[in-house]
Every structure is written in C-alpha cells, then in structure tokens.
Amino acid sequence: GVSVSAFATPPTISRVKRQTRSRGRTSSKSSTCGSKRHYYRGDCRLCSSSSSSSSDDSPQINPNDLESDEERRRRMTLVRQIQKSFYSDGSSSSSTGIQKNSTKGMFTNVPLWRVQWTELPGYQNVLNCHVAHYTHMFQGVVNGRPRPWYFGHVYLPGGSDNLENPRYRLCEDGDSDAAHVGVLMKVSDYRQLDDGRLLLIAQALGRFRIVDATQHAPYAIANVELTPDRELIQEYYPAALDLVRAGIGSDNVKLLQAVAWEAARIAAVNEAMHWETFEYRNVNVNDTLTGGVEVSPIANYDSAEVPTTAFDAESVMRDYIDTAVESSGIEDLDEPPNDLDAASFEDAKREILNIEREVWKDVDYLIQLLG
C-alpha cells in the first residue's frame, strides 16, 4: 500500500469531486458546527452524516476531503517540518548512522532495501517508494545525514512479504536462503509527494557482501564489505605483496598473501570512491519533471567533478597493513585466488584483452546481421 504520514490522509475520489463543500462562494447559512473539531460553510454534512443515521450504508466522509487546495498545502508543509525534525535530530531509531571505513573498505550500519529484483553497478533508476517501512528507511537516509546518501540493494524473493520469514533471515549460518551479496546505492535526489510516497533517483555504485546484520525489522541494517572486480584487485596485488613482506615479519606465505590481497582490495575500493563524483553525475528530480530531461538507465560522467588530486594507493595500503599487524583477526582473512602464481599478471592482462577483443568482434558481427 501507499505509505502515508500519520498526519496525512490519502486523497480519495470524493475529494476530487468536492461534493461535501461549496467552492468559490459563501453559503447563505452561517451556522456553527457543534463538533468544535472543524468548521464548515453551510450544511455540515460531516456531522449530519454521523448523527442523522447509523445505517451501514451511510457514506463515511474523510475530514481531509473538506480541505481546499491551499489548506492541504499548508497542512502538508507542517507535516514535512515535523517529519524532518524527527529524522534529523539523531535521537530516533530511524537515524541510519551510516559510516564509511576507508581503512577496511567497509560501510557500517547500512540500511538494506531488500526487494524482488536485482541491480547492477553503473546503472541508475527512478524509484517509487510507497511501502511504509521503506519510506521510513529512506526518510532516515536523506534526512539523517549529509550527502552522499547511501543504502544497500539486496535481492529478496517475494520482497517485503518475506522480510520476517526465517528462511530469508540474514547471517544465519547454514539455515538461510537469503542473498548476502548486494549493491551499494546512492540517492542522487528525491522528492516526497503529497500522499507520502517518495520519488528517488538511485545510482548503483558497486558490489558488496554482507558481513553481519545488526537489525532485521522493520527493515534490515548491516555492515557490508565492498568487493571490486578481481582484475581491479589484482592490479594492486604485486605492490601490496611487496609492502606486506617489508611490513610484517612472518614466514607464513599464505598469511602474507592473504594480507596483501586484502590490502589490494581496499586500494581498489578507495580508488572507486575517489572517482565516484566523476563517474556518477548527480541527477536532480526537478530537472526530470520540469525540464523534460529523461533519467538515463546508465549513470553519466560529470566532467566538472574530475578529482584534482591523484589517488595514493600506496598510502591506503600502508594504512591497512599497519592496522593489520596489530589486528587479532589477521588469521581469519580470506586466502587469495589459487591461480595468482600460475601466470604473470602481464599474461593475465593479455588474456583479458584477447577475450574482450573477441567479444567486440562478435558484437560487430551481430550488428551487421541485424542491419
């Protein structure tokens, strides 16, 4: 159903017809309603309908249906002010508290939008959020902290119907069918409609895996670890391995490789975040509504937001390695892929380029056939 503020009532057909009230003229009657809870011009059908008949067939009149357009605008302005004070004061449970941990390549306290379809990094969509618990979640995202406004997208069969289904509970060892891989999203812009729905422009930034869930209902919140493509991590691995060998006094080869792979992952994550403002141009809701600008399904570059400083991968990896030396969980790191030593990285690059070349040849051939 449509999510509506507790202070607002959704419009009905009777509101459009305005049969319960005269507009544009003053009634000849000037009675005073005995209810004291509302005023009226002429016959008060709201009161008469409740007192004149107790029949089940009597029409039920919504008090908000008696509003003029101007009265409704004033009321909804007050509603929005109350909402913002609730979500922005940081004291309510709706405050998201999202934190980016660059040293570990993680985001903590990420609210998760678990829905029945998947998303891919690099895409952007216009979302129409109308379910109560998710309008509550997004209000906390856009009002609870300054930009950028992050949240997570995770696939859930059946969507909200299965949020509290034990079969899809997050981080249940061996007993859950829940997806634990999702996409980090960013709200580019939003608008709240009069009936409480949220119109959001969301951009998919990168893949993550859920490390642990800190909340399950009314929506999930989790700590997530970003997982760049393997070739991006592999690009930094040789330099990371050299830094690890120099910084960690250990003869355990697998341990050194695991720390180096993690340092390379963190470098790849931070590089992606370094270019985020350039690779994902902010799209404004007003531009799409009033300027006739369509929202491209693929996120667009913003040439005005090219970073003015170079990305320092070595510094990022050193920070992590220094932390890892003092960490008690260093032995729990995932081991790097087994084939890292099977061939040189230059050979791996050449292989990827050859595959890409063949793909483009096939695409070109397909276009010729279609033409």
Image (spheres, helix red, strand yellow):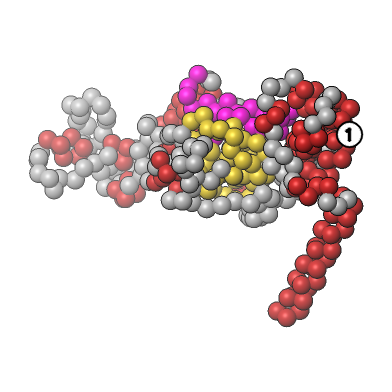
Q: Pick out the residue farthest to the front.
A: 251
Residue occupying the point 38% across, 35% down: 8
Rendered position, 85 above or below 211: above
Q: Quadrant of residue 361?
A: bottom right
Circle 1 residues within 10 Å: few <14, some 14–19, many ≥20: few
Q: Is residue 302 visible?
A: no
Q: Quadrant of residue 309?
A: top right
Residue 220, image x and y in percent?
Answer: 49, 35
Residue occupying the point 16% across, 40% down: 49
- Residue 104 in magenta? yes
Q: What SS does tag 1 mark?
A: helix
Residue 297, image x and y in percent?
Answer: 64, 55
Pick the residue in front: 163 or 137: 163
Pick the residue in front: 368 or 182: 182
Q: Quadrant of residue 249?
A: top right
Q: Mark 1: which amino acid? A: Asp
Residue occupying the point 37% across, 31% down: 7
Residue hosting label 1: 242
Residue 30, image x and y in percent?
Answer: 22, 32
- Residue 268 in magenta? no
Q: Is residue 230 visible?
A: yes
Residue occupying the point 87% across, 40% down: 238
Pick the residue in front: 64 or 348: 348
Pick the residue in front: 282 or 228: 228
Which quadrant would the C terminus be assigned to in this image?
A: bottom right
* Direction from residue 19 to residue 337 in the image, left or right: right
* Direction from residue 6 to residue 118 in the image, left or right: right
Magenta-tinted stretch: 91-111
* Direction from residue 195 to residue 140 in the image, left or right: right
Rendered position, 352 above or below 193: below
